[in-house]
Amino acid sequence: MKKNDKTPSKKPGVSPNVLGLHAAVVEQPITATLETNYMPYAMSVIVSRAIPEIDGFKPSHRKLLYTMYKMGLLTGARTKSANIVGQTMRLNPHGDAAIYDTMVRLSRGYGALLTPFVDSKGNFGKSYSRDMSCAAPRYTEAKLTPICAELFRDIDSDTVDFVDNYDNTIKEPALLPTTFPNILVSANSGIAVGMASQFCGFNLKEVCDTTIAYLKNPDCDLTETLLAPDFPTGGELICDPAVLRDIYDTGRGSVRVRAKYRYVKAENLIEIYEIPYSTTVEAILDKVAELIKAGKAKEIADMRDETDLSGLKLTIDLKRGTDPDKLMAKLYKQTPLEDSFACNFNVLIAGSPQVLGVRQILEEWTAWRTESVRRRVYFVLKKKQDKLHLLKGLKRILLDIDKAIKIIRETEEEAEVIPNLMIGFGIDQVQAEFVAEIKLRNINKEYILKRTRETDALRDEIDDLEDVLNSPKRLKKIIVEELEQAAKKYGEPRRTSIVYGHEITAYEEDETPEEYPVNVFLSREGYFKKITPLSLRMSGEQKYKEGDGPRQSFETTSAAEIMFFTDKCQVYKTRLTEFDDTKASVLGDYLPAKLGMDAGENVVYAVLPGDYSGALLFFFENGKAARVDLAAYKTTSNRRKLTGAYSDKSPLAAILRIDEDRELAVYSTEPRCLIFHTALLAPKTTRSTQGVAVMTMKPKYHLDTVKPLEETSIVSQSRYRVRAVPAAGALLRQEDSEERQMDLLEQ
């Protein structure tokens, strides 16, 4: 070993790695870890990422729009999106993809906002499509929409605070001085840590009118002017006045929106041209296809997406004799063509997340906007006061201009000009510097008279501005005027129409289908047939695939419930109404395909649960048996598939249903037989129980079959009967075997 090696010396029985590990472990209370490591992250996500502030924007939105404003894109021509993204990275460090996604959502082309802030050119995707993605930023162009002038009005007049960006190189606004409550106009959603936010959009004109009404009377009825949420994708909002009032009061609740359609009689089809904001065309098409496949929408011949440049359009071809209104009522209930939008008005107020109702939001916004207007008025006032101060100094000089010229000419050093003017006329340094910068050409009578008149006008303006600052009524009037201008200039009609519950026809399930006797047959390979007794009597032999044969058959009714257990420890529940009546001469429905089973999954047993009385016995190859009450498979919802139907610890050998205790014969491959009473098996509460041992076997053998005693050919039953389990059973004699009985029958 070299002398400069720093390998630690070994201690007897202790590994160096162990020593290093112990040296690195530092005990720390979990509360301290959460406070120092997790809480800063959680607060960062809440305050700086996911929850909008009172101006209606998240930081990512604000940084993007302010960058575009500084790039001159409010009045200038469009520029490449990639250029905007690159410039925004000076304020937003989260990467170009995240910035571009933000711009897409704010764009007119994407259509996620009632009042888009980005005027886009190119493919920006569509909010109503899951699969239609936007083009890369190098292909698209953008600029700000005209309404952004309301976002940045007087932003350079100290209306909002400015803060450093992430690397302290430039300043950015903490909020945007919006002249209207954008927090209620722009739909917004975000998921933070331990909380979320979900704002629905409201119509701009309605919001402005409501804010004006609130400013005039804080106790006004909001529902008179703020009719209901408005969504960019249109549709019909099913209005429930009580629900709306609850949302307005608490900031939480949900509204239901459904699609709009028209019936084209000449072609016997339905055109859906507006859908709920919270869904996509792909989700609707998938659900309708699922209904058609399940046989629950037999009125539909075909459905396709015909969306083009003219807008969204889903077309449904109808079968002859279909009532379009009745079909749409069914689709509204069973597909996302009618969907709910959950509201959670969680907003950051002074850095603290709060869930507020509409009235509280208006209260916070008006207070913030009042302060913003006050700051703007004060900024203008200060500018005018500074100008008046300069003109007062100029007035003193102009009263004796010859004296001023004489002072300047007789001053030997340039640095002494300002002090000498200050002494000669009794003015301060700022006034003296202003006077000293006057051009020689301006020392004339006309200039002097103009400045004198300007002084008088400035005094009047300053008095007026001071009156505004001291008059809440006048500040409120300014806000109202700006709201009226915004509503007049940018207001648009509602896109989402309003309907009331009594105006729509709710879909009602058809009456319970007629029940009649049927016979059902299940084959070993999973083919299933439902045949009426009359058809069964008129038919010949049951048809099966080559190598297939009967597994189970039942006599029941056409609307009975049935459960299919599979070799993957799952059970599929359905009703016989899902199967068409057929004949014995056909193969029937292939259950793995009909029920949508997993790949390689096969049916092993069918059960008609009826009223879910009785129990199921599961026998496994390791000799164990589990008794599970049928009630364990009863569900309140219409679930088609239950996992964990039985234990997977050992391969399944047999399933039997028992309605009352009875004797069973259990066979092993040795061959041995054992007869026991099912009362020895106690019911288990869980479906996946491993059960208890019934038959003990040698390692190379396993449990093979189980039958009710009366269905066996055992002659000397006492030889195999046991009073307790587990037991090994007795070797099967030839006269008690199935093969022996078959030989006797053949003779």
Image: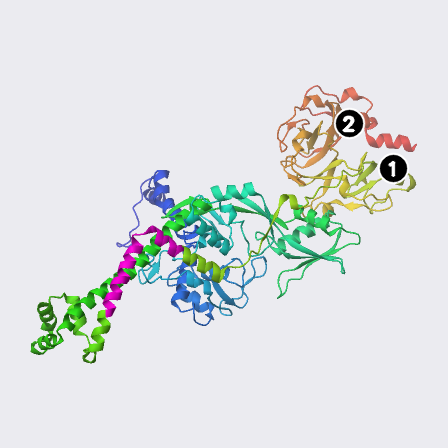
Distance from disc 1 to disc 2, alpha carbons, whole Å, reads 27 Å
Give the amino acid at mark 1.
Pro
Give coordinates of residue 232: x percent, y percent: 55, 57
Residue 552 vs residue 361: left or right?
Answer: right
Q: In which quarter of the image is the C terminus?
A: top right
Magenta-colored stretch includes residue 454: yes
Residue 316 vs residue 246: left or right?
Answer: right
Q: Does residue 405 sit above or below 497 in this rendering?
A: below
Give coordinates of residue 362: x percent, y percent: 43, 48
From which residue to which does the magenta span run?
453-479
Along the viewing direction, whichever of 462 and 257 lies nearer the viewer: 462
Would residue 624 be visible to someone looking at this image? no
Mark 1 or 2, nearer chain start:
1
Majority secondary structure in the magenta region: helix
Residue 678 vs residue 143: left or right?
Answer: right
Asked whether disc 1 touches disc 2, contact meaning CB atoms under 8 Å apart, the reply is no
Residue 305 vs residue 33: left or right?
Answer: right
Q: How crowded is mark 2: few (under 14 residues within 10 Å), some or many (20 or more)?
A: some
Along the viewing direction, whichever of 166 and 119 lies nearer the viewer: 119
Residue linked to disc 1: 533
- Residue lying farthest to the bottom in this orientation: 441
Give coordinates of residue 494: x percent, y percent: 56, 56
What is the secondary structure assignment of the residue under circle 2? strand
Q: Does residue 385 sit above or below 209 in this rendering?
A: below
Along the viewing direction, whichever of 533 and 152 lies nearer the viewer: 152
Foreground label between 1 and 2? 1
Q: Residues within 10 Å of mark 1 (few under 14, many from 20)?
A: some
Specify the quadrant of the image occupied by residue 84: bottom left
Q: Residue 708 carries which label?
A: 2
Would residue 700 be visible to someone looking at this image? yes
Give the amino acid at mark 2.
Pro
State how many labels appear. Answer: 2
